[in-house]
Amino acid sequence: MLCVVFDKHFRVIGRSRKKTKGHEGMKLGLKRINDNIREAISDAGLEIHEIAGLGIGCPGPLDFAKGEIREAPNLGWINTPIRKSIEDEFGFPAVIANDVDAGVFGEYQFGAAKGARCAVGIFPGTGIGGACVYEGKLFRGANTSCMEIGHIPLIPNGPLDGAGNPGSLEAIASRLSIAGAAAQAAYRGQAPHLLEEAGTDISQIRSRVLSESLEAGDTAVKEIIHQAAAHLAMGVVTIVHLLAPDVIVFGGGLIEAMEDQILPTVEKVARSRILPSLRDDFKIVSAQLGDDAGVMGAAALAKQFVAKD
């Protein structure tokens, strides 16, 4: 959980980080968020009344009208009044956004998609998050975030994703699905380095471990990664045919760890399946801002909101 204080030129002047604790309870979680905000303000040497506003990227679907997280399964939170909690505690306005929306908006404003007319982000992780910035504004539904790229159906009656939907992009190309397939390969003796380093425990097969497995010569893992990349390419094909973006940004830990193994395959397969008239109208890039994308994007959204008011 990262909180950063920026000046009006988006220079960092304060920072605080706390570990996220799953299922610690909504009240304790909201208190942890507010404590983190307070520590970042203190680190900046500022008083609370000097803060113009705050943006926060939140997991899960949101209710923008109420300022609530509708559901965050990994935290065990339902209908969490995060905006009210912050505004009641500090008094300055708070703007909530989906965490991937915030990250892609950060890349649009300051990073890999700067200057794009239409930028789409695809972030494979436990699931696969997506977001779109069009002419400076985030795509959003009437009252919630959209661009649920990970739930695009690709394989009828395929494996289930976290929402119980069969054959979605998330079910076959997320870091979690890759880890599951790699664990099976290790169990069968097809990935000896992975078996030695992480066993067959999916929770231990993180992006770094997968990358090390590739470097050590586990060819079965390399094939799994390339197959997932080919599936991610189908997500790109769908997005290009729908939106014709000029930039598609891939980000997240999986991409950071294995960009050279994933993005060339995504690019090759996607361009082979896209209409010729659209094939050369976009570029695929990796995210540039790392962990700071979300906080920078959230801050930029807050500035946008405060400026309106």
Image (tube, rainbow, N blue to C red):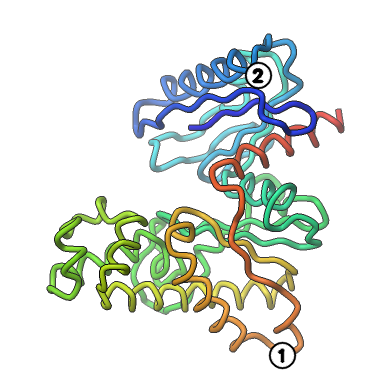
Quarter location, residue 171? bottom left
Marks 1, 2: nearer the viewer: 1
Q: Which x, y percent locates residue 239?
A: 64, 71
Taking depth in this image into account, of 149 and 163 the one nearest to the observer is 149
Q: Which x, y percent locates residue 11?
A: 71, 31
User: Is disc 2 surrounded by few (<14), some (14 to 19) or many (20+) residues within 10 Å?
Assistant: some
Residue type beneath disc 2: Glu
* In the image, farthest residue toward the right: 308
Residue located 59% across and 38% down the image: 57
Q: Is residue 198 left or right of residue 89?
A: left
Residue located 64% across and 35% down the image: 96
User: Is disc 1 surrounded by few (<14), some (14 to 19) or many (20+) residues within 10 Å?
Assistant: few
Question: What element does badge 1 sit on?
Answer: loop
Q: Is residue 116 left or right of residue 308?
A: left
Q: How many marks?
A: 2
* In the image, farthest residue toward the front: 216
Q: Quadrant of the C terminus?
A: top right
N-terminal of the pair, mark 1 or mark 2, is: 2
Residue type beneath disc 1: Pro
- The reply to whether dot 1 and dot 2 touch (C-beta < 8 Å) is no
Quarter location, residue 201? bottom left
Residue located 56% across and 59% down the image: 148
Q: Which x, y percent locates residue 199?
A: 15, 58
Q: Which x, y percent locates residue 293?
A: 61, 45
Separation of residues labelled 1 and 2 (CA atoms): 50 Å
Residue located 65% across and 52% down the image: 104
Q: Which residue is mark 1?
A: 276
93 up-or-down from 216: above or below: above
248 up-or-down from 114: above or below: below
- Check residue 87 in the rendering and tell me which mark sits there, or answer none: 2
- Check residue 147 in the rendering and tell me which mark sits there, or answer none: none
Question: What element does badge 2 sit on?
Answer: helix
